[in-house]
Every structure is written in structure tokens, then in C-alpha cells.
Image (cartoon, grey):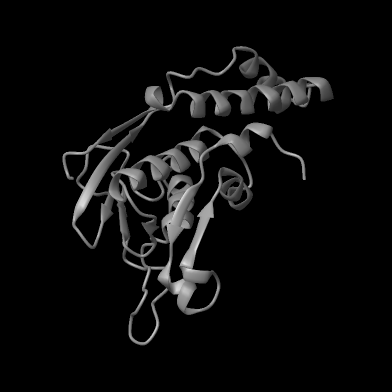
Amino acid sequence: MRYPKFFDSIETIKVKDELSNTLGAFEEGEYEFSYLDVVKAAGHSCPTVAGAYLMSLEALKVLYPEQRAMRGDIKVEFAEALEEGVAGVIANVISQITGATDKSGFKGLAGGMFARHSLMFFQADISSSARFTRVSTGQFVDVIYNPSPISPDPKMAEIMKKMGQNFATSQEAKEFSRLWQERVERIFLNTKKVLHIDTLGM
């Protein structure tokens, strides 16, 4: 399997999941997600997928400063509707990492133990990209993600136009792919420019 090498340099997200421990999937319920893991699930790497990963990574480090983030103990809210913009793509990535879902998730064992549904909400009354809440303590952080400071290479628009008209050469298509992932890498290298965390809820 071949993929951009910078994927391997991105910090992983360490979690603890009592459900996985109870059902014998991971010893002590401890495992981690890599950026490569979410790219496999999403089927692609882009500024949106990268942003969802970064939001989760940084928000959970604030909410769980001295321990692994606890899956099933994380509520996530979005200002947008599920169908609006890229909210659904972001929600899917964050759901994979945190376990939080709206109404479609796991209903729990023995009357609700380890339930994961009703932990994700849309059209919430917030002014950020997403709000992550640690359910057990009520602490929350608001996260704003904006990749626009990391501009795409100007060549990309020209090549994309050719691709849409089936005029692009194979070499141009390869160059587009390279430039696309180069921008994603630059987003990860410039986290402070694209991500802001408001900790007033801590």
C-alpha cells in the first residue's frame, strides 16, 4: 500500500474504550487512531478530512490532558445542519474517532450500557466549527477550523479544469495529486494558523 509519507508523521489519537475492553477487542480498551486510519475510512485525504482529524486531536488533548480520551464520554455539536456543506464528512471522521453518533449509533448493552447514540448534534447554538464536551465533567471546548490561510498551489485550478474536460495528461493528473496532498501536509504543519480552540468551557 503506497501513500504520502507525511501521513506517518502525524500525531496519533490515543483513546480508551470500555466497550472494546468488555467485548474483548482491545486489552484494557486501549488503542489509537492514525491519520491513515481515517483516510482509509473516508477514502481520501483532503483539507476537510485533515481538519476533522485536527479538531479531534487538539480538542481531546485539552479535555483529557493526563489520560486517554474516553470513547462514549464525548459529545460533539455542530452549528451546521448535517446536509450543509462538508458537515457530514467532518461528522463521519469525528464519529469514527470519538464514537459519538446522532440517532444511528450503538444502543448499548443490557439496557444502554456503553451506548453511543445521541452524542452528536447538528444545528446547535454555537459559534464555532464544533464543540466537544466531556460528558462526565461537563467541560467543553469550542474549535474553529479554517484552512484558507494555507492556499492551494495556483496550478491546481488550471489542472482541475482540464481534468473536468478530460484534457489533462497523465502527468498533469499526477501533478494535481501531488499538489493536493502537499497542501494537506502544509495544513498539518501549520496547525496554529488553521485551528483555534476556545477553552472558556474548561
Left of 32 or right of it: where is 141? left
Left of 57 or right of it: where is 131? left
* Vertical placement of residue 125 versus 15, above or below: above
Q: Quadrant of the N terminus?
A: top right
Residue ranking furthest to the front: 66
Residue 154, position as x, y percentages in the image: 59, 12
Report the number of numbered marks: 0
Q: Quadrant of the C terminus?
A: top left
Tell me which residue sits at (41%, 49%) in the image: 83
Residue 46, position as x, y percentages in the image: 56, 35
Left of 115 or right of it: where is 138? left
Residue ranking furthest to the right: 170
Which quadrant holds residue 161?
top right
Residue 149, position as x, y percentages in the image: 43, 18
Query: Which residue is nearer to you in this view: 5 or 42?
Result: 5
Residue 116, position as x, y percentages in the image: 38, 68
Left of 185 or right of it: where is 115? left
* Vertical placement of residue 183 versus 91, above or below: above
Which quadrant holds residue 170?
top right
Tell me which residue sits at (24%, 60%) in the image: 135
Tell me which residue sits at (56%, 47%) in the image: 34
Tell me which residue sits at (47%, 68%) in the image: 29
Which quadrant holds residue 51?
top left
Residue ranking furthest to the bottom: 110
* Vertical placement of residue 2 versus 168, above or below: below
Residue ranking furthest to the top: 154
